[in-house]
């Protein structure tokens, strides 16, 4: 049985506590109060409540840590070199429409590196967790990325830009390039779970742009700890800063990156 460190146990405890309210609220999704945060971007009271629970629990047991949270933004800690990165409800649109595919995700960033992560899907009771150099686990089972190495066998995942956001032309061009050469493409609406699924070998690869740090921080660590490769669209390591990501195993990452570079080059030449 996999042994969790005290830090992972702290994170899991907070996530489990927040999940109880979210699970209950999901059962009454028609009655949730919602506020409009932007075009096609709705946040529920359940989202805010879960973030408050996570912040209170984690700050009590790790009072020196800073925070970067979806709803509350950045909160400086006594230690300037370490912070929690929190998305209390990744897959908000799914949640508000009664689609049972959403998760809570928490990561630790230390000196610019993600060193621990937890992503929990309450409705399936799937807990993904990892620490740098210690592997990634689904509950108590260690994970590895898929072993597929041909694009025509690959099942990929991605995200579609929301209404009101830029990037639709780029996304459509990327889809047009990928679709003829892969086994399938899925869009399930939770980047945190998409990356966890790559780590688990359920998806062979994932790409998206326009993400926030809290969408993907834990998932980046998961893929790396599962033996996969993660870069931004240019092949660099600035995913948290520029919001773009390509995640796959060692055989598929390079051809995926070539497709995306070709699309961007073609669009730039128009």
Image (cartoon, helix red, strand yellow):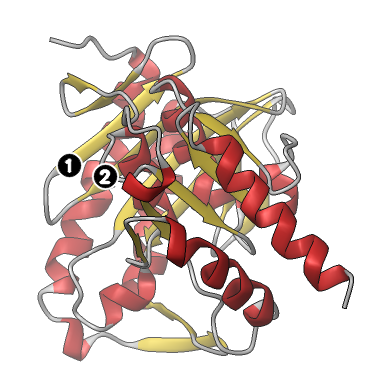
Quadrant of image for the C terminus: bottom right
Q: Is residue 12 above or below residue 140?
A: below
Choose top left, top right, bottom left or bottom right for residue 81: top right
Q: Which mark is residue 120?
A: 2
- Given residues 259 and 43, the one toward you in this image is 259
Q: Residue at x 74, y 52 (%)?
A: 242
Choose top left, top right, bottom left or bottom right for residue 165: bottom right
Q: Is residue 124 above or below residue 102?
A: above
Q: Secondary structure at mark 2?
A: strand
Horizontally, residue 8 falls left or right of residue 70, namely: left
Horizontally, residue 53 falls left or right of residue 2, namely: right
- Given residues 268 and 83, the one toward you in this image is 268
Q: Is residue 243 visible?
A: no
Determine which residue is flagged by label 1.
Answer: 126
Kindly indicate whether the residue at mark 2 contacts the one at mark 1 (C-beta within 8 angstroms): yes
Measuring from the top left, give residue 162's x and y in whole percent.
54, 81
Q: Secondary structure at mark 1?
A: strand
Q: Is residue 36 visible?
A: yes
Q: Residue at x 34, y 50 (%)?
A: 193
Choose top left, top right, bottom left or bottom right for residue 45: bottom left
Q: Residue at x 66, y 55 (%)?
A: 260
Measuring from the top left, give residue 159's x and y in whole percent.
48, 66
Q: Residue at x 17, y 42 (%)?
A: 126
């Amino acid at each position: 049985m996999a042994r969790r460190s005290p830090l992972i146990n702290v994170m899991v405890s907070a996530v489990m506590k927040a999940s109880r309210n979210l699970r209950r609220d999901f059962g009454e999704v028609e009655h949730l109060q919602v506020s409009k945060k932007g075009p096609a971007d709705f946040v529920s009271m359940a989202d805010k409540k879960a973030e408050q629970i996570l912040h209170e629990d984690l700050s009590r047991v790790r009072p020196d840590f800073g925070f970067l949270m979806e709803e509350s933004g950045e909160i400086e800690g006594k230690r300037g070199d370490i912070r929690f990165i929190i998305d209390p409800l990744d897959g908000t649109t799914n949640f508000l429409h009664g689609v049972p595919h959403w998760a809570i995700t928490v990561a630790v960033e230390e000196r610019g590196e993600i060193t621990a992560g937890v992503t929990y899907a309450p409705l399936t009771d799937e807990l993904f967790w990892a620490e740098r150099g210690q592997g990634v686990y689904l509950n108590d089972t260690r994970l590895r990325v898929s072993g597929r190495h041909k694009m025509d066998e690959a099942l990929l995942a991605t995200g579609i830009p929301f209404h009101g956001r830029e990037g639709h032309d780029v996304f459509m061009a990327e889809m047009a390039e990928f679709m003829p050469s892969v086994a399938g493409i899925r869009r399930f609406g939770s980047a945190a779970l998409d990356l966890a699924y790559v780590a688990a070998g359920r998806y062979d690869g994932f790409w998206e742009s326009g993400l926030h740090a809290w969408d993907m921080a834990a998932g980046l660590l998961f893929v790396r700890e599962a033996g996969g490769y993660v870069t931004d669209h240019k092949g660099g390591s600035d995913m948290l800063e520029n919001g773009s990501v390509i995640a796959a195993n060692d055989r598929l990452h390079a051809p995926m990156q070539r497709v995306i570079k070709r699309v961007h080059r073609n669009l730039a030449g128009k």
